[in-house]
Amino acid sequence: MSAAAPVEPIVVVPVGADDDALDACLAALDAATPAGTPVWLADDAQAGPRGYAIVERWIARTRLRADYTRRQRGIGEAAHLDEVLKACGDADVAVLAPDAVPAPGWLARLGDCFAADGAIATATPWSNAGEAASWPRIGEIAPMPDDLPALGRAAAAMPAQYPELPAAIGHAVLLRGTARRRAGGLDTASYGSWYAALIDLSLRLAGLGWRNALCETAFVARRGEGRPADGDMDALNARWPDWHSRLAHYLMQDPLRDARTRLGASLERVGPPEPQRDLFA
C-alpha cells in the first residue's frame, strides 16, 4: 500500500481594514501560490464596503480554492484567529498577514520545512519587516523589495538548514496543526493581538520540545511589523519574564548573520525565472 499523500496546508488571511494592502496581498497570493490551494479569508468585521468588494471580486477570479467568512461583530484579533484555527482541526495552517506580499513558491518552501523535520512546529520565512527574520538587517524594517520574485528565487536557492528562531513571526507562519493543538492553541484570555499570542504559543511549543524555525528558502514581504494590543506586553512579561532579554541577546548576537549574507549573494547571482517553476518546485 502506498503512503498517503500529505494534506496540503490551509492558508488563512485575517482580513484587515486597509483596503489597498488587502488588494495587494490577495493579488500576490493568487500569483505566488499553486492553483487549488485552500484559502480562508477570515473577516473579524474589519473590511468596509470597498474591502468587501475587493474580496468578492478576487474570489470570483482566483485560481485558488477560496472561502470568505465575516463575523457580524468583531471579537478581537487573537480570539478570531483562535476560532479559525480550531475550525481547521489538525490541519497545518499558514497564517498570512493581510498586508503581506508573498514571493512565488512561498507555501511550498514552508511545506518543505515541515517535511524535513517533524520537530518543527512553526516555520517563518524571511521578510523585509520580520524582526528576528528580517533581511537584509536583523531587527530593522526595510522598504518593500523592488524585485520580490527575484528575491524569492534567491531564497529558494539557499541551502535549507532551518535554524532556530526565538519565536515565530506574524508576517507569515506555517503552524503544524497537531503541535498547535497539543500546546492548547492561542491564549485568548491573556492576549488580544496575534503578535503577542503567537509569541506565547511559540514559547509554549518550545517548552514542549518543538522547534520554531526560519525557513530560509522562502520570502514574504510586508509593509510593516505587527503590533501588540494594549496590555499584551505586560501579560507576556508576567508569563515569560526572560523573553525580552532572550530576544535582545538574539538580536545582538545575530546567529543568522551568515545566512543573511548568503541570501544577498544569492540575489546577486539569481537569473531570470523559469516559467511556472516557482509555483510547483
Image (spheres, rainbow, N blue to C red):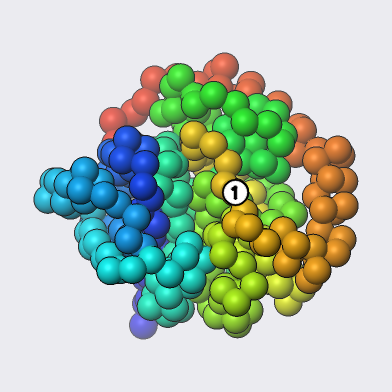
Q: Is residue 146 above or below residue 126?
A: above
- Picture coordinates of residue 208, whole percent (x, y): 73, 77
- Picture coordinates of residue 153, whole percent (x, y): 47, 31
Mark 1: secondary structure: loop
* Quadrant where the C terminus is found in the figure: top left
Q: Residue furthest top?
A: 268
Q: Is residue 136 left or right of residue 49?
A: right
- Crowd class of label 1 (few under 14; some 14 to 19; many from 20; radius 10 Å): few
- Picture coordinates of residue 67, whole percent (x, y): 23, 62
Q: Is residue 92 visible?
A: no
Q: Is residue 37 above or below residue 83?
A: above
Q: Is residue 17 visible?
A: yes
Q: Is residue 128 left or right of residue 21?
A: right
Q: Is residue 80 above or below residue 17?
A: below
- Amino acid of disc 1: Arg
Q: In percent of the image, x 55 and y 80: which residue is there?
A: 181
Quadrant in the rendering for residue 140: top right
Q: Nearer the viewer, residue 269 or 207?
A: 207
Q: Nearer the viewer, residue 228 or 183?
A: 228
| Residue labelled with disc 1 | 227
Q: In percent of the image, x 36 and y 63: which residue is there?
A: 44
Q: Is residue 254 left or right of residue 106?
A: right
Q: In percent of the image, x 38 and y 50: which residue is there?
A: 16
Picture mark count: 1
